[in-house]
Amino acid sequence: MYNTHDILETIKMIEEEHLDIRTVTMGISLLDCIDNDIDKACEKVYRKITTSAADLIPVCEKIEKKYGIPIINKRISVTPIAMLASACQTSNIVKFALTLERAAKTLGVNFIGGYSALVGKGFAAGDYALIESIPEALSITDHVCSSVNIGSTKAGINMDAVKMMGKIVRQTAELTADRNCIGAAKLVVFCNAPEDNPFMAGAFHGVGEPDCVINVGVSGPGVVRAALEKAGDMDLTGVADLVKRTAFKITRVGQLVAKEASIQLGVPFGIVDLSLAPTPAVGDSVAHILEEMGLEQCGACGTTAALALLNDAVKKGGVMASSHVGGLSGAFIPVTEDAGMIDAARAGTLTIEKLEAMTAVCSVGLDMINIPGDTPAEVISAIIADEAAIGLINSKTTAVRVIPAIGKKVGDELEFGGLLGSGPVMKVNTASPLKFISRGGRIPAPIQSLKN
């Protein structure tokens, strides 16, 4: 039961420290929409989504008013569209993207994810068609997000898919160059992708999920930073304990909203993703938490250790506060979406190499990083391969969301607006990995995958 102190503390977190529910995401299975006629399949998809999620936004707005807790995004994730495309007797599957866009506009949601393919071990019939259609699909839609899983600890890394995705990321940026390459900001390449992730652009509704489910993503970097600031000097054991206790409080808010949304929508409660998701707003930054621990600036030596402490403490505190924790859960480090990381990248303290080291201990991977517009496709593929290897060996989710800033060079700025923020174009090592990437094949699963 909440006491008066808990209620007042939560109100302060919301009003002064940027606590919010970052997203309520409804996952919807489209397996019953499969049809060999793409027009019939699309009509089934539209009807299923708009029927299932008809009350999503009204219910979220009602919860916001009831508890005074901001819900920033209302989103939908669907079954990977490549699975539906496999049954269609056509290779032109962009109609599915247009259908998802139409459904998103009808419902008024912020984003819809699931224009996705799972090719960690190889390609099924619809996978090639979907991947090749991604640049066009993301250039002609505003709300559709795409993801491709190219590997897992159990299967290894599909290097043929990695090679393809370097080209796809470039083409997507080129087709949206007139809109600050926004298409690439809606595309994620995963290793070990979770099936219940509520966060975009990587959300899709996994095949092991219920027909319809509610997943919630919380936030609150500002709350953690404020708690550390008030606590003053303490050793790192004390810091970890404080972060755990703060993460518990944040996650309890997410659990409350998730259960309420589940009841009102008549849909099962899936998970709470307790990731610390930053925004460009001052005071709502993961980088500022690391600096509050004692680093002069994010990216300095010691950043990886500080982030490891933060990520672990967030998980330990959050897992005690929710009956079902899932998704990504930890600390996000998207450069353009984090005010402290934007400053560190501009100052040169934070480099892509340092970010790669940080991804070994954080929630996801290389996220929302602007790279020079002339970066070759094989270099992008190699960045994806490196990040996938970290996920592969460490049995964790890793991802790459880089934006080739077409027409821009190192030090120039790319502006997206909103939660996607802005940031400098960062330097990339362009020593050629072409021969390595061109080999194709598969990087075998590591020995630790043999756990049966």
Image (cartoon, grey):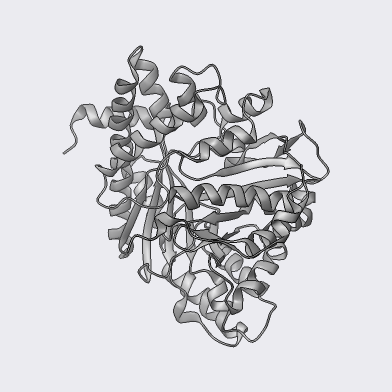
Q: Which residue lies furthest to the front in this view?
A: 447
Q: Residue furthest left?
A: 1
Q: Which residue lies furthest to the top in this view?
A: 233
The structure residue drawn at horizontal position 34% and vertical position 40%, both measured from the top left corner, is 315
Quadrant where the C terminus sits is bottom left
Quadrant where the N terminus sits is top left
Q: In this view, does 371 lie to the left or right of 240?
A: right
Q: Is residue 118 left or right of residue 2?
A: right
Instruction: Tell me where residue 366 appears, x and y as whole percent.
Output: 58, 43
The structure residue drawn at horizontal position 46% and vertical position 77%, both measured from the top left corner, is 31
Q: Is residue 280 left or right of residue 4?
A: right
> Is residue 417 in view from this perspective?
yes
Viewer-nearest residue: 411 or 7: 411
The structure residue drawn at horizontal position 70% and vertical position 68%, both measured from the top left corner, is 132
| Residue 55, image quadrant | bottom left
Viewer-nearest residue: 343 or 194: 194
| Residue 316, image quadrant | top left
Instruction: Tell me where residue 304 appears, x and y as whole percent.
Output: 49, 30
Q: In this view, does 144 lie above or below 423?
A: below
The structure residue drawn at horizontal position 43% and vertical position 51%, both measured from the top left corner, is 395
Q: In this view, does 438 lie to the left or right of 68?
A: right
| Residue 289, image quadrant | top left
Q: Residue furthest right?
A: 407
How many numbered discs? 0
Instruction: Tell me where residue 138 appears, x and y as whole percent.
Output: 67, 60
Viewer-nearest residue: 13 or 211: 211
Instruction: Tell me where residue 126 appears, x and y as whole percent.
Output: 60, 77
Viewer-nearest residue: 38 or 88: 88
> Is residue 18 in view from this perspective?
no
